Every structure is written in structure tokens, then in C-alpha cells.
Image (cartoon, grey):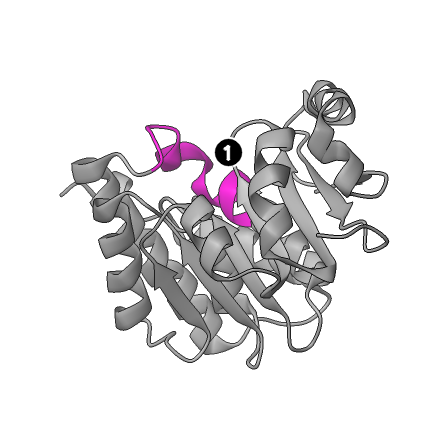
């Protein structure tokens, strides 16, 4: 398989790691660097077979997708239990799993079986079982089974903010929050949430730029703990 489609140059990785460390405020370990590189290789290879993330993965994986995930980690408490809805190819969930520190845990929620199997393969190969579970089910199913089980629910490319908030709400503990990675048109999405009934179940949206290429933001919705869930 052509090297250009299965890995990135040492210079690209060096730049990615430096920018990650700048965002995090601490240095990546040798294992974290190796795990990120191995995850990237597995994802690029699987994407050719299963179209896990689309063609832009070969140009934007490090500069956009990996780096966009990193600022989410600042929202994790020391023992956060996190659900990543619609995990797909594992971004941001697996990136965060590589960077987080047990007892922080992440549940990757993915209903498409081929994608869930890929996630399980990565978790096994990178020995991330101490902090990651793959749940091969729809978010609605999980919400019915695991009410108020999570400190944070995160998503990327899941659909409208209102749709994601509706899925996240039953999963969140009373003091929990939904974190959605959104693009340049986030203002329109936030406006749609305000007009939706689910918008009344959360506090005022907080917008945090991700500070990397693409103009993306994290929209944080704190659960309205004064309301009955």
C-alpha cells in the first residue's frame, strides 16, 4: 500500500505532537506518541475498506481531526466517565482515550457494526481496555439502559446540536455536560437549539474556539440540574 496513504511524514507528526503539547500544557509520553501513530495507521488502512471518515482523512487527520479533539480533555474531571456518541472511526473518542489518564473512562457508542468492530480492534491492539469500552448500540438504546451514568457526553459530526442534546440528556448526571464539536456555522446550530424544546433542559450554551485550523468550536451545554430529568 502506498506510504502516502498509510502514514504521515515525521515532520507532520513532530508538528502535530508539538501543537498537542501546547494545547495540553504537558508533554506526551513515548507510549502516547506511539499509540497515536499506530491508531492513525490503523484508521487510514481501514478507511480504504470501510470509508470510516471519508476522503479528507488523508489530508486533514492530524491538522484537523486529531487536534480538534485535544481541547475536549480540559473538560474532563479526574475521574470522568465519558460517552462518545457516534464514534465512527474513533475521532475524537480514541484520541482522548490515548491522552486521558485512568480512572478517566470513555465509552465509544457506535451502532454500525463494521465501525464498532474496528474500534474494538484498535482498543485491543493498543491495550486501552483499562479506560475504553466499545458499545455497539444506538445512543437511544444506551439512554434507556444507562440513565444519568455519565459526567460528559461528547460528539462530532452527529447532526444538529438539538439532536445531539436530545440524545445526551438522559445519559448525563445532574451536573453533567454535553460537549459538541462544531464548525464555522455553529451560530446557526445554537440558534436552532434555542428554538427546540430540548434547549430548555440545558443552561446557556458556552462556546470555546478549538484554536486550530478550520474555525471549529466546542459548544458546551451544562445540564439544567434544577429540572427533573
Q: Position of residue 97 (x, y in %)?
A: 49, 66
Examine the rendering and report whether any part of residue 135 can be seen.
yes
Q: Residue at x 47, y 76 (%)?
A: 30
Q: Using the image, determine if residue 77 lies above or below residue 178.
A: below
**Is-magenta flag for residue 57?**
yes
Identify the residue under disc 1. Answer: 157
Kindly report the secondary structure that dominates the magenta region of the rendered protein: helix
- Magenta range: 53-67
Q: Position of residue 75 (x, y in %)?
A: 72, 60
Compare residues 73 and 79 and report the one nearer the observer: 79
- Please state if 226 lies on the left or on the right of 89 as rendered: right
Q: Using the image, determine if residue 179 lies above or below residue 34.
A: above
Within 10 Å of the Cα at label 1, are there few (<14), some (14-19), or many (20+) other Cα atoms? some
Q: Quadrant of residue 149?
A: bottom right
- Please state if 224 lies on the left or on the right of 155 as rendered: right
Q: Quadrant of the N terminus?
A: top left
Q: Position of residue 225 (x, y in %)?
A: 81, 55
Examine the rendering and report whether any part of residue 6 can be seen.
no
Compare residues 127 and 78 and report the one nearer the observer: 78
Amino acid at each position: 500500500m502506498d506510504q502516502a496513504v498509510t502514514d504521515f511524514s515525521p515532520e507532520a507528526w513532530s508538528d502535530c505532537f508539538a501543537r498537542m503539547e501546547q494545547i495540553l500544557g504537558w508533554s506526551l509520553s513515548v507510549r502516547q506518541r506511539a499509540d497515536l501513530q499506530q491508531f492513525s495507521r490503523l484508521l487510514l488502512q481501514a478507511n480504504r475498506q470501510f470509508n470510516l471518515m471519508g476522503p479528507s482523512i488523508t489530508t486533514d487527520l492530524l491538522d484537523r481531526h486529531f487536534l480538534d479533539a485535544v481541547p475536549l480533555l480540559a473538560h474532563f474531571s479526574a475521574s470522568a466517565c465519558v460517552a462518545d456518541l457516534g464514534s465512527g472511526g474513533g475521532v475524537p473518542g480514541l484520541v482522548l482515550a490515548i491522552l486521558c489518564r485512568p480512572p478517566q473512562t470513555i465509552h465509544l457508542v457506535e451502532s454500525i457494526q463494521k465501525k464498532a468492530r474496528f474500534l474494538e480492534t484498535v482498543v485491543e491492539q493498543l491495550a486501552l481496555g483499562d479506560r475504553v469500552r466499545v458499545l455497539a448500540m444506538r445512543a437511544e438504546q444506551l439512554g434507556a439502559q444507562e440513565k444519568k451514568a455519565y459526567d460528559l457526553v461528547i460528539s462530532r459530526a452527529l447532526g444538529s446540536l438539538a439532536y445531539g442534546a436530545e440524545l445526551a440528556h438522559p445519559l448525563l448526571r445532574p451536573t453533567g455536560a454535553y460537549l459538541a464539536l462544531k464548525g464555522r456555522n455553529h451560530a446557526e446550530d445554537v440558534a436552532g437549539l434555542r428554538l427546540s424544546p430540548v434547549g430548555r433542559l440545558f443552561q446557556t450554551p458556552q462556546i470555546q474556539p478549538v484554536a486550530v485550523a478550520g474555525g471549529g468550536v466546542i459548544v458546551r451545554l451544562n445540564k439544567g440540574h434544577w429540572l427533573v430529568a
